Amino acid sequence: MDSNKIWQIPPFFKEMLERQYGKQVTEKILQGYQTKRNTTFRVNTLKSGVDEIETVLKEKKIKYETVVWSKEAFILKNVEEKEIRNWEIYQEGKIYLQSLSSMLPPIVLQPKEGEDILDMTAAPGGKTTQIAAITNNKANITACEMNKIRAERLQYNLQKQGTNAYVMIQDSRKIDDFFSFDRILLDAPCSGSGTIQICGENHKSNDKLEKNFTIQLMEKSVESQTALLKKAINLLKPEKEMVYSTCSILANENEEILGKILKQGNAEIVPIQFEGMNQLPLLPTKIQGTLCVCPNELYEGFFIAKIKKL
């Protein structure tokens, strides 16, 4: 497939990709942008189990696959999201529509029962509900969201999924340093450079991308990400761990921000390792121990780093 004929991206963005990854890997990324992703969901183990959901899928004659790194994650082959939203198991909160990539940060975080856990940018609630499921609803979870409307949506999803969590309507950058947490998930707002998806010659979508995906957006994201990460380190208890993640594949929103924080000397990278990680389509990263997922038919582009406070 000739990406130049089908795919038009802002010149500055393509230059950034080529400068960071080289032309060969950039071409692979562009191919990923052009691929229609499969619908995926996660079983909510607070309300159901994998066996029940598999039975429903077989009854509905849905073709599906699983992934080696999570028995709760399902890839659907012959059904769209809009149809799933009508299913009883969806309406009852037994499953949660979620991209595979966004399921990774809570797994990397490794939350435990009884811990004080902060989700700094929680809406719409996918990762918060996943953390609750991993900890059997026995962790003290604070889910932070500064926008009131998004916070209401977050609260709705938490209730639907049967999740125990306290919703704090607050800009995470302004949380009082009086608070402290055993684990923190910071899935930072970003340019979304990993989630771009255009299938075929969709020139209208291309035009919208060129209008909205700007250097100014990126600069604003970097400023916010830096402030959020600094605050996260402040709120994290000494010797405890946090996860920083973005749906961007650009170093200026990921490794460069991390590098500045690490230079301050009060935090270090914890190398990410979990079963099935070698099955992920990974891009090279500039900081050893972090991971960056390449966009393809199954995954959005996604960066994840695990950090320990010293």
Image (tube, rainbow, N blue to C red):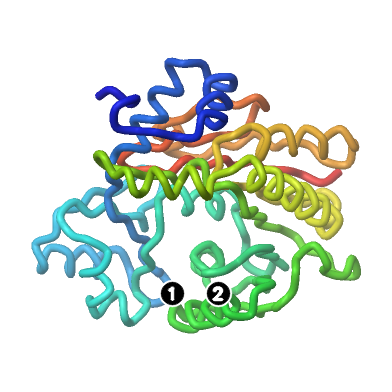
Q: Position of residue 283 (x, y in %)?
A: 50, 27
Tell me if 61 is positioned left or right of 5 in this view. left
Is the C-beta separation of discs 1 and 2 under 8 Å?
yes
Task: Indicate which disc, 1 or 2, sits on the residue closer to the N terminus.
Answer: 1
What residue appears at the point 62 percent right and 54 percent down from the top-left corner? 189
Q: Give residue 46's mark.
A: 1
Instruction: Name the one closer to the observer, 202 or 145.
Output: 202
Q: Position of residue 106 (x, y in %)?
A: 55, 55
What amino acid is at disc 2? Answer: Asn
Using the image, determine if residue 138 lies above or below residue 63. Answer: below
What residue appears at the point 69 percent right and 72 percent down from the top-left corner? 146
* SS at mark 2 in the image: loop
Using the image, determine if residue 183 lies above or below residue 56. Answer: above
Q: Give residue 88's mark.
A: none
Q: Quadrant of residue 143?
A: bottom right
Q: Give residue 137's mark.
A: 2
Q: Quadrant of the C terminus?
A: top right
Q: Is residue 141 visible?
A: no
What amino acid is at disc 1? Answer: Leu
Q: Quadrant of residue 164?
A: bottom right
Using the image, determine if residue 232 lies above or below residue 172. Answer: above
Q: Quadrant of the N terminus?
A: top left
Instruction: Name the one closer to the observer, 80 or 217.
Output: 217
Q: CA distance from mark 1 to mark 2?
A: 8 Å
Q: Position of residue 305 (x, y in %)?
A: 64, 40
What residue appears at the point 30 percent right and 47 percent down from the top-left corner? 37
Q: Position of residue 180 (x, y in %)?
A: 83, 65
What residue appears at the point 36 percent right and 34 percent down from the top-left corner? 32
* SS at mark 1 in the image: loop
Using the image, determine if residue 136 lies above or below residue 308. Answer: below
Tell me if 270 is positioned left or right of 48 in this view. right
